[in-house]
Structures are given as structure tokens and as C-alpha cells.
Image (cartoon, coloured by chain):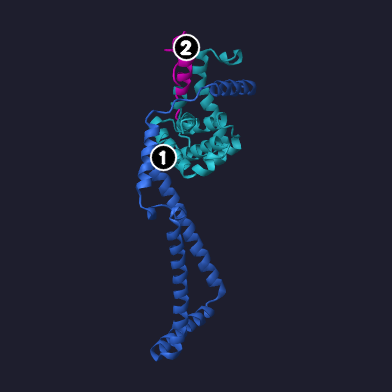
């Protein structure tokens, strides 16, 4: 469990954007893993199994509580205000920049964050994300693009954007 | 933003996200998992799923199901036999048969078009009920 707890927690936290809920999900994942202990102990793909179960449980959680957040299928048109980089110190360390990116990721609306995380961390295609989240392909593409644009100021403040994006 | 800039944005964001290290799981996670497992282990066996029941209990359960099915079959056979031998039951059976014949003959007098129309109305009402339910869900829970 110790070998995988960071991966499981991180996967859940990035999808649901809430540490306490991510911990609940991670707990459920490991309880399920215990039930399949005999199969997983001898399997080389136990990490993949854990990641898949974590992703599924996190997406189920998002679906169950979609009423509290924005739904996947609707866009209320409210413009999203990305975190401002104005207060960032130029001499922030790499670690601090990473923490800022994590925070910016967490502050994204649930539908944008989950689509972005599935695309960039889980390597799913637009079509697969659309099927997993039960939203249209166009909405998924829009959500991912908006999420990237929302992260852009933080990346620019970290100095990791290219010249083409600075303008 | 043009297509090139979009691609560049995707590349830059993707690279930045891929470089993020894993976050540390909270130190409370492992004790919570152990507590949850202990709670589960303390539950009596019949609270777990069937595959986790003791072998003896599973065998008894399967045997019981087979016995109940056999009893139901024997009961049905006895009932049919009793119908033919008990006058009261025979009369009741005859009454039910007569009633079903009345219903069937009544159904035959109805023009087929009426039946199709009735089915169409029922389907339309069902669809309307489904739409109302969906609208209520979207209005109340979103």
C-alpha cells in the first residue's frame, strides 16, 4: 500500500479537486484492493489496476455530486476567472511553481478539471473522455481548451511558456 | 488564438502537468484503511457478499434453494391434482376459466385499430411521464 498510496491519492485528488474526498476515495480503493489481494499480489499490473479503480471511483464520485458542482452536460456561461499570477514572486522555486500549478488545477471548475486531467494524466482521447464523462465531444474540447487557458497565466509566471504564447 | 497557438498551448500545458510530481498521501490514509478493514473483518459472515461466505454456508444455501424449488414444483403438481379431485377447487378453476374466456371473447370483439390506438396512447403517456420526470430532475437537482 505504501508503494502506491501517493499515486492513488494524487490521481483522486487531481480528478475531484478536494483532498478530503480524495482521501475517502483512496481508502475505498485500498479496501477493494484488499479484497483482490491474492490476484494483485502476484500481478505485475497491480499499479494499473489501482489507477483504473481510482479513476472510476473518482468519476463516479463526480457524477454523484454533479448537482453540487457544475454539471458535465451544461455550461452556464459564467466566465471563469483564472488565478492571478500578479502576486507571484519572480524568484519562486520550482517546488513553489509546482504547488501553484496544482492549486490552479484544483481551482478549475469540476468539468474542466476532470476533462483536462483525463487528457493529460490518463492519456485518454477526446472521444474516450466524452464517453467517460457523458458529455458531447464539442463540450469536452471546449472544457479542455478553457482549462488550459486558465492555467496559462500560472505557467507564464513560472516562465515555462514558449514565445508563441507570451503574446 | 489560432490553431498553431492552440497546439502550442496543449503542448506546454501537457508538459507542465506531466512534470508535476505525485502528491504525498495524507498520513491518516493508512490508519483509515486499516480501520476500515478491521471494521469489515468484524462484520458477521452473512453481511458479506455470497462469494465470501464460508463454504459450508454456501453449500447449505444452494441446497436450501434447490429444496425450495423442488417443494414449489411438487406443490404445483399437487395443486393441479387437487383441482381435479376437490369439488370446491374444481368449481373455482372452472369459474376462472369461464372468466378468462369472457375476457378473451370481449377482446376479440374490439377492432384491432382500437387496440393499436390504445397502445399508441399508452406509449405516448409513458413517454410524456418520462419527459416530465427528466424535466423535474433537471429542474430540481441541477
Residue B134 visible, this orientation: yes
Which residue is under mark 1? A65
Q: Colour of chain A?
A: cyan
Image position of B118 with respect to A25: above or below: below
**Which region shows up in magenta?**
A77-102
Q: Colour of chain B?
A: blue
Looking at the picture, tell me which residue is in the foreground, B112 or B100: B100
Is residue B42 shown left or right of residue B105?
left
Q: Residue at x 54, y 33 (%)?
A: A118
Q: Main secondary structure of the magenta part?
A: loop
Image mark for residue A39: none
Q: Chain of mark 1?
A: A
Q: Chain of mark 2?
A: A
Query: Mark 1 or mark 2, which has the lower sequence index?
Result: 1
Image mark for residue A93: 2
Image position of A130 with respect to B105: above or below: above
Give SS at disc 2: loop
Query: Picture quarter containing residue B93?
Result: bottom left
Does the magenta-highlighted stretch encompass residue A99? yes
Q: Callout 1: few (<14), some (14-19), or many (20+) C-alpha neighbours within 10 Å?
A: few
Percent coordinates x, y for residue B65 in the rendering: 45, 67
Percent coordinates x, y for residue A159 in the rendering: 53, 12
Percent coordinates x, y for residue B92 in the rendering: 41, 86
Q: In the orientation shown, which residue stands out farthest toward the right?
A: B4
Amino acid at each position: 500500500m505504501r508503494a502506491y498510496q501517493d499515486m492513488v491519492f494524487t490521481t483522486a485528488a487531481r480528478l475531484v479537486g478536494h483532498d478530503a474526498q480524495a482521501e475517502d476515495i483512496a481508502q475505498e480503493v485500498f479496501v477493494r484492493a484488499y479484497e483482490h489481494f491474492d490476484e494483485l499480489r502476484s500481478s505485475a499490473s497491480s499499479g494499473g489496476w489501482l489507477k483504473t479503480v481510482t479513476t472510476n471511483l473518482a468519476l463516479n464520485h463526480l457524477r454523484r455530486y454533479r448537482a453540487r458542482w457544475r454539471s458535465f452536460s451544461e455550461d452556464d456561461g459564467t466566465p471563469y476567472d483564472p488565478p492571478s499570477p500578479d502576486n507571484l514572486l519572480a524568484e519562486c522555486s520550482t517546488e513553489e511553481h509546482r504547488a501553484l500549478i496544482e492549486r490552479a488545477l484544483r481551482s478549475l471548475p469540476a468539468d474542466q478539471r476532470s476533462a483536462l486531467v483525463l487528457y493529460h494524466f490518463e492519456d485518454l482521447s477526446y472521444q474516450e473522455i466524452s464517453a467517460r464523462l457523458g458529455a458531447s465531444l464539442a463540450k469536452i474540447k471546449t472544457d479542455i481548451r478553457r482549462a488550459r487557458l486558465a492555467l496559462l497565466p500560472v505557467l507564464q509566471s513560472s516562465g515555462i511558456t514558449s514565445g508563441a504564447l507570451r503574446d | 488564438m489560432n490553431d498553431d497557438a492552440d497546439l502550442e498551448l496543449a503542448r506546454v500545458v501537457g508538459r507542465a502537468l506531466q512534470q508535476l510530481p505525485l502528491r504525498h498521501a495524507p498520513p491518516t490514509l493508512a490508519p483509515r484503511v486499516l480501520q476500515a478493514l478491521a471494521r469489515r473483518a468484524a462484520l458477521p459472515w452473512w453481511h458479506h457478499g455470497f462469494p465470501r461466505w464460508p463454504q459450508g454456508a454456501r453449500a447449505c444455501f444452494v441446497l436450501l434453494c434447490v429444496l425450495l424449488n423442488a417443494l414449489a414444483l411438487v406443490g404445483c403438481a399437487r395443486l393441479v391434482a387437487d383441482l381435479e379431485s376437490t369439488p370446491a377447487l374444481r368449481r373455482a378453476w372452472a369459474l376462472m376459466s369461464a372468466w378468462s374466456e369472457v375476457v378473451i371473447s370481449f377482446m376479440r370483439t374490439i377492432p384491432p385499430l382500437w387496440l393499436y390506438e390504445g397502445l399508441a396512447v399508452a406509449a405516448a403517456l409513458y413517454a410524456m411521464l418520462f419527459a416530465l420526470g427528466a424535466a423535474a430532475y433537471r429542474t430540481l437537482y441541477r
